[in-house]
Image (cartoon, rainbow, N blue to C red):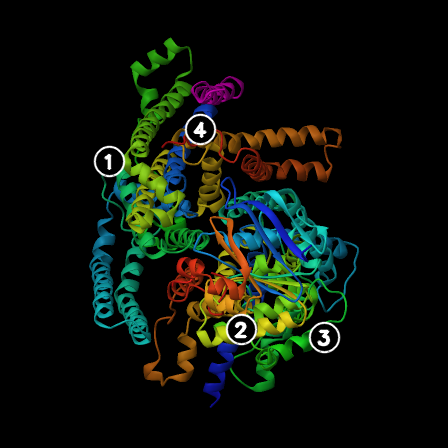
Amino acid sequence: MTDFLDAIVLLTNYVLVPGVAYGSQLALGALGVTLIYGILRFANFAHGDMMAFGTMVVILITWWFQSIGFSIAPLPVALVALPIGIAAAIVMSLGTDRLVYRFYRRRRSPSVIYILTSIGVMFVMNGIVRFIIGPDDQRFSDGARFIIKAREFKQATGLHEGLAIKLSQGITVLVTLIVVVALFRFLHKSRTGKAMRAYSDNEDLALLSGVSPERVVFVAWVIAAALAAIAGTLYGLDKSFKPFTYFQLLLPIFASAIVGGIGNPLGAVVGGFIIAFSEMTITYAYKKFLRYLLPDSWAPDSLVQFLTTDYKFAISFIILVVVLLVRPTGIFRGRT
Amino acid sequence: MSPMIRNPLLFAVMAAMLAAVGFGQSWQVALTILNLCLISAVMALGLNMQWGYAGLFNVGVMGFAAVGGLATVLVTKAPVVDAWAAGGWRLGISFVLLLATAAVVVVVRRWLGPGPIRSLVTAALVIAGYFLIRVFFDPATEAIEAVNSAKTGYLGGLGLPVLLSWIVGGVLAAGVAWFIGKVALGLRSDYFAIATLGISEIVIAILKNEDWLARGVKNVTGLKRPVPYEINLQADAWFADFAAWFGASVIEASSIFVKLCYAALFLAVLLIVVALSERALKSPWGRMMRAIRDNEDAAEAMGKDVKRRHLQIFIIGSAVIGIAGAMLVTLDGQFTPGTYQPLRFTFLIWIMVIIGGSGNNWGSVLGGFLVWFVWIEAEPAGLWLMDVITSGFDDASPLRAHLLNAAPHMRLVIMGVILLLVMRFSPRGLIPEVMRR
Amino acid sequence: MSFLIGENMTGGYGAADILHGCTIAVELGEIVVIVGPNGAGKSTAMKAVFGMIDLREGSVRLDGDEITKLSPQERVRRGMGFVPQTSNIFTSMTVRENLEMGAYLRDDDFSDTMAQIFDLFPILKEKSRQIAGELSGGQRQQVAVARALMMQPRVLMLDEPTAGVSPIVMDELFDRIIEIRDSGIAVLLVEQNAAQALAIADRGYVLVNGENRFSDSGQALLEDAEVRRSFLGG
């Protein structure tokens, strides 16, 4: 019996808990991508770098707080810096919209033009981030490390396996929950939110109904930038901040948005968790887990790992391609 | 200004800029830049075929360049006999099993009708085949990587001349493109872009982690050269005479001579690719490609097999990128999977094509030259600029130190801004596509 | 002086004109139908009245006011409702949300209007919380019409509302349109099902090559031998 419980705890510790946290981070990123896709109708390649930009501002403010000894321990002080990072990301995205995207919107350019311009924006933002904070790994988490420590868990339960929940994971899940609930309330209850959904659903009819496209686009950028800054900060608190990693997050984020059905916010959230859990379950080595469950003579010698973590991109990608080929609109029928 | 005057003038300006580097900095630097300009131009030509001729949004250039680079290792390195003995046969079996799994899946899928059962059976077969393969594959790679792992730890190559690897690089990239195209070409353009981006990341992940193939991040160094070594030249009496006649030191002359040899080889490849592309573009085949790009539905309605044509051009373009990738690794003399970064190997090539003028081969050549030149020269220029800006600061000022330190990253900003400006004010590029009937 | 009139309209999409001096007028409490062969410019004429096409010549007047230069959105504000032929609902939103979007420009309380519309289309009340994209074709058309009515327009323009629905649904829809007319709204209709449409119409226009060929009461057009032979299939 304890063997069985140990197996469950093991899986919870190494797959479920990190999966929920990672899934939340992907969901927030994918929500931003899907929102921009729904309103401006292009896949924004600069989204990862927008996350990096917002996070960078949070880190700089956090460092300043740390240098003057300001702290909200046990919580990380980055949470206080987050609103400033959000504001900076919003200013940045509205600025790029004004300088870059609006021109093409007025000309009703095809989406490939938008994607190409977003690649230009990606270069600029990437350069700015590297220029200001450098290309290296940065840590900015302070306060307590754990909500539940593995050793305490073992002592309390008497099991062999420990369960550790990092504070950053708890914060990630809580913040995501608040943000997602607030966003869905906004989209479904408020006049502007409904206008955004209408515009995303049927642009011409929304225009006919009197929805102002500039206003909808404005709100979309504000929300997407805020989501990017939040997602980036949570990811950085949970793991660490490195500009290139954030660029690479683009792939699982796109995969989440598309798997869920691009343009569909609910799909983005579900897609984020699907991608996160697929990565976790496929790259986890089940050797120890099976040792607990199987009789000794059956216990495996190999790691029992489908793929090493080096290939986690492959997982997002394979899921993406399979979904696109089997059900091109995604799980929750997004835009086609 | 008519294109007849304008275009040669643009190339003349480009040549003058390279010459300025030669006189101002050094000819070594100028030739180093020139060689990479030539390689970039070939890569840009490959992408231009896909995007400019056919409108395929390939954001996986990096993957094909890396596959081409891999060919250099596989062709030129001497085979590691011990490694083949240690794991060769098991690797062979896993390869046969891979083919067998693929065959079984294909046959079973033909046999079962479409539906959930077919999907389930396919998934089950793939998973079963995967584990079966790993029974042989894992010990094989482990054994191979254990053979003198500090020096080899991989299977080695065929020990053939390096120039052959350029062709093989093209063929390998074409093979990968065939596979990717079969899967992804049906997708709409933005999904295709994301899919190719993903594949290129996977290719790099494989090259980094499959040590048995090309030593992964341990790198393969000391690749063969198609040109003489500086040391050997310096030892030759005739070369010393030649250098003396030229009025340069033997060491400098040898280095420049080697770079010129590379430049001649790369230029030859570039000219061949340009000549073939220009012929293709003007042929009925090129006309059909453009017709498909401009109106896929109409072309399809006229009985053109759009998907097949797309696959064709995707393979050809990728092969050209693969050749360029092999050339690059040959020039470096080493294969370092860790250095492949999408900004440099995918998006920079995109900027070359867009700025040069998508759809125009000469535009891509110019774009390759110009963008690479700016990419390299933006670094000293940025440094100089930061130095000027901060010249009033105290030398010990941390801000000055940071700005000087971070200046190289400004080239990303510069590239992005150039791309945005060209797209906005000259969307057809420096040498626009010629509108033919 | 008609309530809404597009007079002597000439124009089209881009270079080639589709309309050549075509005139369409409709009064309050009247159903006017535009019929004609394929490519005659029926829908174009309606879109011109609604301001979705730039006119080279001619003018549009609503209740005596010159509105030729106004955007479609402005015309909606002035009391013109338009139901496009396709993509005329928000498929991912509920029926109620579709109606709310119809009233997007209204700042006042529109619950009365919604109640009236639910009286007119009882099935929509029943399905008000359903996603509009999941409704049947006929119900979707009702949503589309209801959405346009949320602004309490004085003119309602419908572009082939019965395209692709069954004859029973078509009759039902026409009954509703008559009710809308009887509430004092001017109804302008473009129809492919010419005979059925003319049967409920007060007046009709037959358009050919962007020009008015016949205009008369619906009944008279139905009885006109030439109209029958040429446009109603015998």
Expressed as whole percent of the image width and height from the top left, the position of residue B359 reads 41, 35
Q: In screen coordinates, is A26 left or right of C100?
A: left
Q: Please tell me which residue lies in front, C81 or A143.
A: C81
Quadrant of the rendered structure where residue B415 is? top right
Expressed as whole percent of the image width and height from the top left, the position of residue B351 reads 49, 38
Q: Chain of mark 4?
A: B
Residue placed furthest toward the bottom: A1
Give the spatial CA distance, label 4 vs label 2: 63 Å
Q: Chain of mark 1?
A: B
Viewer-side label of 3, 2: 2
Q: Which residue is mark 2?
A: C173
Give the spatial CA distance, label 3 vs label 2: 23 Å
Mark 3 residue crowding within 10 angstroms, few (<14) / some (14–19) / many (20+): few
Q: Please tell me which residue lies in front, C87 or B423.
A: C87
Picture layout, residue A254 above or below residue A282: above
Q: Chain of mark 3?
A: C
Do marks 1 and 4 share a chain?
yes
Q: Which residue is mark 4?
A: B366
